[in-house]
Every structure is written in structure tokens, then in C-alpha cells.
Image (cartoon, rainbow, N blue to C red):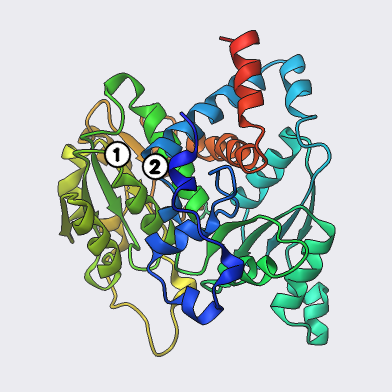
Amino acid sequence: MDWNSFLLKRKHLDEIPWDVFQRLPLEEKANYFVQNNGRPFHVLIAQQFERESLDKLCDLATRIRRIAKSKTGMDFLSILLKHKRAMLDFTQPSSRTFLSFYAACQILGIRPAEVRNSSTSSEMKGESRMDSMRTFSSYFDLLIMRTPEQGLAEKTAWMLSNTERPVPIINAGSGKDQHPTQALLDIYTLQRSFERRGGIEGKHIVFCGDLARGRTVRSLAKLLTHYPKVHITFAAPGALQVGTDILAQLDAAGLPYELTADFKSTIGEADAIYMTRIQDEWDSEEEKPAKFNLAEYSFAAEDLKRLPPQAVIMHPLPRRSEIDPACDNDPRAVYWRQMRNGMWIRSALIATIFVRDNEITNYYMMNIK
Ligand code: NCD
């Protein structure tokens, strides 16, 4: 297995004007984020991943996870990217994504730096976002960005492609739009959960909650199209039901789905339930979703009785009341493990971007397998 299938489609970001690039379909944009060995250079949208690359990243995450269990293994990992520095630019709240990227950098020996509050940066003096990003690129070798604005990470990648330091950009959550690395860790969690049940293929995944504004759902639904015979149920109150853009992607892939307002009726038939938080930070005076009963879109302790014995409950977290903490110790509640998986898959992704994946695999084959 190599990365050549991506190489064949590779296009150059520095050769296309921004306004033309911006209007391209997502599948087409993905071809601009590939490096000259076929691996991803930027990681900005879920459309960049296909089944082969997902399997590769999951395998690499597992190898890193197993190597990291011993001091000699950690010593090996921690010198792989010792010569690199990363900038975490998080201008939107984050705990898990920030910390797991931070930890992933540390595992690989990368020295991370951070801006978490633009009020302490020169943007307060009127500097543009693009100038700030160009500044970061002159000191660091990797930029990891979380932004309330959609498309800012893409714009940064495009802008830097015309400079002397076109460093890789990873999108760690862009507005209501995409969260590709969360989708990767969700896929890794699903794959591990169904390891002994034939993998993700053919499973029934129920998404529940704020499907209109949850970016994790958009990115994960796209990745699920790479697994044959998966079917999806979207359970949400009318105003928060999933967007037509996501459904169009599922239609294009021939993946079956249903929409329902009755979450509780789906529990008995699910292989995985993916709960989400109501994203009310996007509410405005003019635009507020119609009132609904949150308990109907929450997983209560008594719902465990209806949940099939092999099914799993997931959540990108943070949670509010969508999952009763009384569920936490049930073996089917995998959201804490899901969170830790983020550190492994993000390590795998960064190692791949910097072409250290084969070295890790060789070490694994020689020392662990
Ligand atoms: C999610 C996000 O930021 O989109 N959290 C995360 O990254 N784990 C989900 C959320 O905020 O509800």
C-alpha cells in the first residue's frame, strides 16, 4: 500500500486564484492538499480521506499506541520530529482537541506553542488574520487552527502556498462547517469497537442532537460513506435536523439513511449512537430554533436497557445533559476512550504529514509485533 492514488490527482494550490478555488466542490478541493509523495500535506476537510487512507491512519494509530506503552518505545517516538515546532492557534474554546493535539506533538517530540486568545495578540492592534498566520508560519513548521469562521484554515493554506514557508495546516474545527480530525478519531473508535464484529461495514449508526450545526456530524457522515452497507439514522428536533448538503453526499455515495424526530425508538436498533450537544452558541436573537424537549434527545440511564448488548454510545464531548453520567461505567459507553483515541490518531496524522509513518511501522514490526 502506498499513497500513489492521491498523487495522480494532485493539484497545486499556488496555481489557482482564491476566488476560483473557493468555489470548487469539496471533492475537487481535496486534490490541492496533497504533498508530492501522495500523503496529505494540509488536513482541512473530510473529503481528503478515502478508505485506504483511513485504514492506514487507523493502523498507524494502533502501532503508535502500542509502541508508546514502554519507555524505549516512547524514546523512539519522541525523537522522530524533535526538529519540528508546531503552533496551536485556537481562537474558539477547546479542551480535548487542543490537549490531544498538544499531547500528540509531545509524543512525537514536536515542541508546541499556542495562542488561545486573540486579545493578547497583535490582532488587537489591527493586524489581519492572514498577517497573523503568516507570522506564525515564519516561526513554526505546522499550524493547527480552530476558528469560529468557516474556511479560514483553507484561506491560510492558500495564502501560504504563495510564500516562502508554505507549512502544513490542520483544521481543528472550522465554524459550523468541518472537524476532520474529530471524524478520524470517531472512525478509529468505531473501528476498534467493531473489531470483532466485522468492522464498521453494515453497521447502523444513529446521530442524535444538534445535527444542523454540529460540525463533527458533517465530517463523520462523509467518512462513513467509505464503509459498505452502513446505514445512518439522523434523530433530531425538526429545526436541528441534518443539512441537505450532508444528505446529498450520502445520496451520491448510495448510503441509505432515515430522518426522525423520535430518537428513543432508534435505540433498540443501533450499533452506535453518536450523541451531540445543542450548539446554542450559534443562536441569535433573530435565529433561535423552536423550543423542544431536550430529554427526548438525551440518553438516560434507563435507555441502557433498550440498547443492544454489543452497541456503543459515543459523544465528541463536551456533554451537558445529553448523556446521563450514570451511563459512564457501562462498558458500552465509549466516549472516554473515544477522547483518548484522538491523541493516537492525531499522532498518526502528524507523523504521516511529516513522512515518519514507514519508520514507525518498521519499528513496530521489528520490536512489538
Ligand atoms: C466538538 C466541537 O468542537 O465541534 N468538540 C470537540 O472538538 N471534541 C463538539 C462540540 O463542541 O459540541
Report whether 317 appears left or right of 80. Answer: left
Q: Secondary structure at mark 1?
A: strand
Instruction: Categorize mark 1 by other alpha carbons within 10 Å: few (<14), some (14-19), many (20+).
Output: many
Per the rendering, the mark at residue 314 is 2
Q: Amino acid at mark 2?
A: Met
Question: Which residue corresponds to the image point at 16% horizontal and 38% vertical from the top-left?
Answer: 269
86 left or right, relative to 336: right
Q: Badge 2 local density, few (<14 within 10 Å), some, or many (20+)?
A: many
Q: Percent from the top left, x then y, of residue 347?
A: 63, 37
Query: Is residue 84 in view from this perspective?
Result: yes
Circle on res. 272: 1
**As drawn, is 276 to the left or to the right of 154?**
left
Q: Residue at x 72, y 33 (%)?
A: 107
Q: Secondary structure at mark 2?
A: strand
The one of 185 and 43 positioned closer to us in this rendering: 43
**Quarter of the figure with residue 249:** bottom left
Tell whether label 2 touches label 1 (CB within 8 Å): yes
State the image coordinates of residue 217 (x, y, percent, origin top left): 37, 56
Q: Depth check: 179 or 225 in front?
A: 225
Vertical side of 43 occupied by 73: above or below: above
Q: In the rendered view, tell whether residue 315 sits above or below residue 352.
A: below
Q: Quadrant of the C terminus?
A: top right
Name the image quarter holding residue 234.
bottom left
Q: Is residue 160 above or below residue 39?
A: below
Q: Is mark 2 within 8 Å of ligand 1?
A: no
* Amino acid on which disc 1 is placed: Ala
Q: Position of residue 71 (x, y in %)?
A: 76, 17
The structure residue drawn at horizontal position 53% and vertical position 44%, both measured from the top left corner, is: 38
Question: Where 202 falls versus 178 (above or below)?
Answer: above
